[in-house]
Structure formats: structure tokens, C-alpha cells
Image (cartoon, helix red, strand yellow):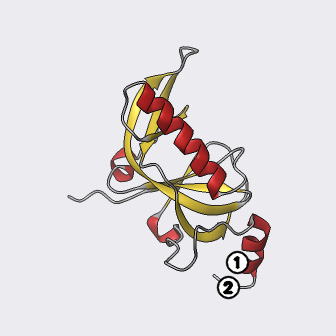
Amino acid sequence: MVALVMHLQKLSVGSKSIQTLRDWQDTVVGRRLQAGLSPLHQHVTRMAPKQSDAILAGGSIYWVIKGMMLCRNPIVALEPVTRPDGVRACSILMEPGPIPVVPTPRRAFQGWRYLKPEDAPEDLGEGFGDGELPPALMKKLVELGAW
């Protein structure tokens, strides 16, 4: 039986744009490479997704920046880890380099949330550059139905 695909959505706290998220991911990947680890981006979260099989069947983490879902990273693995404070957590390993998606408004929330494939925004096609319009302008374009 083929597992259904499930995605995650997560606030990118501190990111001002897709570029600032990309810069952070480059920093994390650089640290991992210096430590002799794989060239994947890692995000450690307290709770492990219960629907891990569905996430690993082709899921991505969709990042919410300034109230807009703007990009995603394909998830490669979910691994148990122990944080420096001794608390167990989940390491979400993903392909680095965020993929811009059609900007989609999202309210603030804590932690991560599941995102069904039918609710996930489509990737931005060629010609939309890097999705680097200011978030306020993107939000206004979405409200006007430009996307």
C-alpha cells in the first residue's frame, strides 16, 4: 500500500524574507559540513510527527514568513536526537535551498502543523524570480487575486 503524502507547516521565526531563510539554511549546512555531517538543512523540534511515514513519502516543510506561506524544503529524514539540555527531540532533515511557492496567508501558530497536499500552495513557476517581493506587497497581491 502506498503511503499518503503529508506536509508540515512551520513559522520561520526571525526570517524577514526567503533570502534570510536561505542564508540561515546555508549557515546550518555549513556547520553540519564542518562537523562531518551530510549537506542537509536541519531543524530540531521538540515533538516528532506521528505521521512520519506520510511525511517521508514525499512531504515538505512549508515556511511561513511574516504571515505568508512563502517557500518549502523537501523533507529527507526524521531522526530522534537529544538536545544539549538532555531533552529528546526530533531532527527534521531537508534539502537545503527553499523553493518559492505561491504566497498564501497564514495566521501565527506555535510549533508545526500538518498540511494536506490539497491545501499546499503550488511552487512558483519560471518568471516569478525568487519570490523576493516585500511580504506586504505579496500579501496585497494575494488579496487582489494576482496569485
| Residue 20: x %, y % from top left | 66, 50
| Apparent side of residue 44 relative to residue 135 in the rendered image (left or right) | left
Q: Amino acid at mark 1?
A: Val
| Residue 12: x %, y % from top left | 65, 48
Q: Please tell me how crowded label 2 is: few (under 14), some (14-19), or many (20+) other residues with Cα within 10 Å.
A: few
| Apparent side of residue 138 relative to residue 55 in the rendered image (left or right) | right
Q: Please tell me how crowded label 1 is: few (under 14), some (14-19), or many (20+) other residues with Cα within 10 Å.
A: some
Residue furthest to the left in view is 1
Label 1 residue SS = helix
Query: Which residue is denoted by mark 1 in the rendering?
Result: 142
- Tell me the quadrant of the picture where the C terminus can be found: bottom right
Task: Give the mark count.
Answer: 2
Q: Amino acid at mark 2?
A: Ala
Q: CA distance from mark 2 to mark 1?
A: 6 Å
Q: Quadrant of residue 17?
A: bottom right
User: Residue placed at 70% from the left, 78% from the top?
Assistant: 142
Residue furthest to the bottom in view is 145
Near-viewer residue (78 or 130): 130
User: Residue placed at 63% from the left, 55% from the top?
Assistant: 19
| Residue 132 in sight | yes
What number is the disc on residue 103? none
- Tell me the quadrant of the picture where the N terminus can be found: bottom left
| Residue 11 in sight | no
Label 2 residue SS = loop
Near-viewer residue (71 or 33): 33
**Does the CB distance between marks 2 and 1 fall below 8 Å?**
yes
Query: Which residue is denoted by mark 2 in the rendering?
Result: 146
| Residue 24: x %, y % from top left | 60, 42
| Residue 126: x %, y % from top left | 49, 78
Q: Is residue 30 above or below residue 34?
A: below
